[in-house]
Each structure stands twice: as structure tokens, then as C-alpha cells.
Amino acid sequence: MAYSTGKQQFQKIALILSNGDYSRPDDQLQNAGANAASFSNALKQIGFQVTTVCNKGKHDMNTAIIDFANTIRDGDLVLFYFFGHCYRVKDKHYLIPASDNMIEEKTDVADFSVDLERNLERFVAKNASFVNIFILDSCGTYSLQRNATLGGKYHL
């Protein structure tokens, strides 16, 4: 079992981001809200303080991540869970926001999606001495509007 090295009591905190209400019918994920609620309830039963954010755009997702990161103290047990579509462009990983109507081709992904690595680095910087858990529950395909075959499989 891991123990916090700090003198103050550590927090068990979680951020759940869940997107399923995507603009293209083929990309919609029917169980996004139910998965978020179920996982949130399970975490609360084991003592986590949980923030759940569902079906938000890039700005709201980034705001939720930054606000959550600002609550982290070194020595906390931090869990980040994302359910939704992810996409990789040039070895960089992105979380696709629910408001994805501007994403038509690969070159749009970086502009209109959430940079996964940059945001995970926020958590690690705040909590370098203890535990950060990152779970990506990402679906295998995401279609781009201009050329559905570009979506392909997502591999992390």
C-alpha cells in the first residue's frame, strides 16, 4: 500500500471526463453518462472526492482539468478517468471534446481537441512524490468528417 510522505492528510481525488454526445452519429457513445455515473459512485464508496464533467467542449474540458489540478497537493492520491474518443497526430495524443463539429481532418485535431500529455503533466507537477492514476477508456474508432477512413484505430 502506498502512503503519503507529507505531514498533512492526503486527499483521494478524482476527475472523470466523459464524452459521448459527439456531432456525428457514428461517433456517438451511448453509455458515456452511465459509465461516468457508475465509476463516480464506485470511487465515492471508497472515499474519493469526485468531480464529474460530461459532454463538454474543449474550453470547458480544459477549465475542468485546470481547476482540478489546482486542488492537488503533493502527496494526494489522484485519479484521472476519460471516457470518449481520443486521437493521435504525430505521436501526440488528444481527447476529443463533445463539441467536435470543427474537427474535419487531422490538421484540425490539435486546434479543437484537448492535449492529453500537457494536461497530465499538470497533475504530475503538482503531485510528484505520490500516486497519479490515469485511465483512458477510449473507443477504437473516431471518424473525421472529410474522410472517415482517416479516423482508423486509436493506439496509445
Image: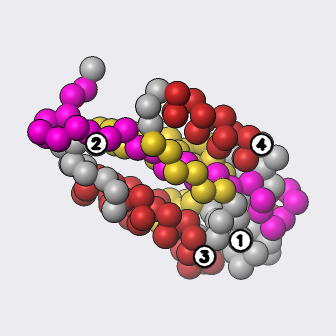
> Could you tell me which secondary element the residue under label 4 belongs to?
loop
Q: Earlier in the sequence, mark 2 or mark 3?
A: 2
Which residue is under mark 3? 112
* Magenta stretch contains residue 55: no
Residue for point 28% across, 42% down: 76
Amino acid carrying mark 4 in the image: Asn
The main secondary structure of the magenta stretch is loop
Marks 1 and 2 in Cβ contact (< 8 Å):
no
140 left or right of 118?
right
Coordinates of residue 37 in the picture (x, y in percent): 67, 41
Callout 2 crowding tier (Cα within 10 Å): few <14, some 14–19, many ≥20? many
Where are the magenta residues, as a range?
Answer: 2-26
Q: Earlier in the sequence, mark 1 or mark 3?
A: 1
Residue 101 in view here = yes
Which residue is under mark 1? 99
- Gap between marks 2 and 3, in whole Å? 31 Å
